[in-house]
Image: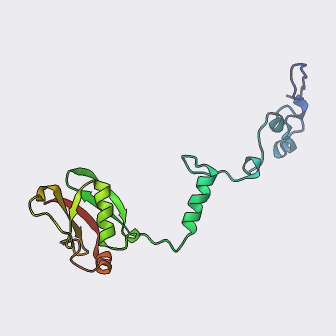
Amino acid sequence: MGRATSSSSSSIESSNHFAFSSTGASASSQRDLSTDLQLGLSISTSPPYGREQPSDWPPIKPPLRQALAEEENECDSATFFVKVYMDGIPIGRKLDLLAHESYYDLIRTLQHMFNTNIIWAEAEVDGDHYEKYHVLTYEDKEGDWMMVGDVPWEMFLSAVRRLKITKC
């Protein structure tokens, strides 16, 4: 094991490598890192190029990452999402109720979202064509289903758990 050979095709001098060294126990406690560095291996614990690498997947481009970080830092943006379900559509949709100022805004958004006409407490309806309309109801804290528009907007926001659009 103490024999050191040198080859013209090898760029590593074997006498520098701890496995071929004859110094004994002191060689195992101190490792020569020249081989690792010549092979391109990094001995640093810091990320390459001196910047922190994101650990999320899928990768997000830096401008989008900054925009998302700014949104997370904004404390004044309040949201209140509820699920909205419609008869005949198997998947519910999320809706931010605090983005609306009144029942009228909410109904207009839902009519556009589901491409339908919705009846609610303050709506004027053509009495001959009820089959074209849907009714908007909500589930309150107690689990009761109520018609939207029966209570003031602020009371509705404090009680609603989810919305449902059903045929007349």
The colour scheme of the drawn protein is rainbow
Quadrant (top left, top right, bottom left, bottom right) of the C terminus: bottom left
Left or right: residue 32 versus residue 148 is right
Residue 51 in the image, given as x and y percentages of width and height:
73, 52
Left or right: residue 21 versus residue 41 is right
* 98, 26: nearer the viewer: 98
Establish if 46 lies above or below 24: below
* 89, 36: nearer the viewer: 89
Residue displayed at 12% across by 56% down: 131
Q: Residue furthest top?
A: 8
Establish if 10 lies above or below 161: above
Q: Quadrant of residue 26?
A: top right
Residue displayed at 28% across by 54% down: 114
Residue 159 in the image, given as x and y percentages of width and height:
28, 76
Left or right: residue 29 versus residue 102 is right
Residue 37 in the image, given as x and y percentages of width and height:
82, 38
Q: Residue furthest left?
A: 128
Quadrant (top left, top right, bottom left, bottom right) of the N terminus: top right
Q: How many marks?
A: 0
Establish if 31 lies above or below 51: above
Q: Quadrant of residue 68?
A: bottom right
Residue displayed at 89% across by 34% down: 16
Q: Is residue 26 visible?
A: yes
Q: Quadrant of residue 162?
A: bottom left
Q: Is residue 92 visible?
A: no
Residue 80 in the image, given as x and y percentages of width and height:
39, 69
